Image (spheres, rainbow, N blue to C red):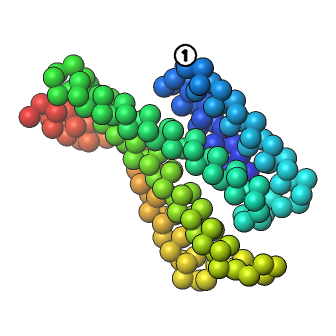
C-alpha cells in the first residue's frame, strides 16, 4: 500500500510536468492527488488499517490512484498518435514515436492491473456477509498472480526497450518507418 502512496503522486507529478505543465487543471489535479493520497495514508495509519485492502479509505486511495495512472496512459497514447501522424508525413522520428508506444504499453498495464484488482475487491466484498472476513479463493489468487506476472513483464520489456533498446531493435523500427 505504501508503494501506491508514493507511485501515484509521483507519476501524476511527472505527467503534469511533462504533458500539461501550463495547465491549471492539471496542476490542481496533481495537488489534489497528493493531498488525497496523503490523507488516505495518514488515515489508514491512524485507524491501524494499512494492511486492510478492503477498507473504504484503502478503496478510495486505489480509485484515486487509478485515475492518475489512467491520465498518464491517455497522455502517452495521445502523444503516440500525434507522433505516428507526423511520421507518416516524414516529420516525426520513428524512434520517438516507438517510445511513446512503449510508454503507452507500460502505462496501460499499470492501469489494467489495479482496475482488475479493484473489481475483484468489489466482487469479494459484495459476496461476503457483513462481519465476515473477506477471503479470496486460491484460484482467484492464482489468476491475480498470473496477471501481475504478465503485466509486470510487459511493463519491464516496454521500459527496457524505451531506455536500453538494442541496436537491432532500433534498426528495425527505423526500417519499418521508411518502407
Q: Is residue 166 in view from this perspective?
A: yes
Residue nearer the viewer, 60 or 90: 60
Residue nearer the viewer, 54 or 101: 54
| Position of residue 108 measured from the top left corner of the image (x, y, whole percent) | 44, 49
Label 1: element kind: loop
Quadrant location of the C terminus? Answer: top left
| Position of residue 11 measured from the top left corner of the image (x, y, whole percent) | 59, 37
* Residue that appears at 21% across and 19% down: 91
* Residue that appears at 72% across and 65% down: 54
* Residue that appears at 63% across and 68% down: 121
For residue 32, above or below residue 159: above
Quadrant location of the N terminus? Answer: bottom right
Total marks shown come to 1
Residue 50: image quadrant is bottom right
| Position of residue 111 measured from the top left corner of the image (x, y, whole percent) | 50, 51
Q: Residue furthest left?
A: 179
Query: What residue is pinned by disc 1?
Result: 22
For residue 44, above or below residue 30: below
Residue nearer the viewer, 164 or 73: 73
* Residue that appears at 85% across and 47% down: 42
Left or right? Give the position of 35 relative to 164.
right
Left or right? Give the position of 165 relative to 23.
left
Residue 123: image quadrant is bottom right
Left or right? Give the position of 56 relative to 121.
right
For residue 167, above or below residue 66: above
Q: Residue furthest top?
A: 22
Amino acid at each position: 500500500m505504501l508503494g501506491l502512496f508514493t507511485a501515484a503522486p509521483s507519476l501524476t507529478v511527472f505527467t503534469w510536468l511533462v504533458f500539461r505543465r501550463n495547465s491549471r487543471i492539471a496542476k490542481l489535479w496533481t495537488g489534489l492527488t497528493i493531498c488525497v493520497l496523503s490523507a488516505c495514508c495518514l488515515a489508514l495509519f491512524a485507524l491501524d488499517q494499512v494492511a486492510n485492502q478492503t477498507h473504504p479509505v484503502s478503496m478510495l486511495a486505489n480509485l484515486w490512484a487509478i485515475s492518475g495512472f489512467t491520465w498518464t496512459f491517455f497522455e502517452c497514447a495521445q502523444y503516440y498518435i500525434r507522433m505516428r501522424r507526423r511520421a507518416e508525413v516524414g516529420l516525426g522520428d520513428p524512434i520517438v514515436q516507438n517510445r511513446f508506444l512503449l510508454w503507452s504499453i507500460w502505462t496501460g498495464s499499470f492501469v489494467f492491473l489495479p482496475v482488475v484488482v479493484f473489481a475483484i475487491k468489489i466482487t469479494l466484498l459484495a459476496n461476503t456477509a457483513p462481519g465476515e472476513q473477506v477471503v479470496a479463493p486460491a484460484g482467484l489468487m492464482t489468476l491475480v498472480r498470473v496477471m501481475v506476472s504478465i503485466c509486470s513483464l510487459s511493463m519491464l520489456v516496454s521500459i527496457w526497450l524505451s531506455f536500453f533498446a538494442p541496436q537491432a531493435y532500433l534498426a528495425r523500427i527505423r526500417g519499418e518507418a521508411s518502407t
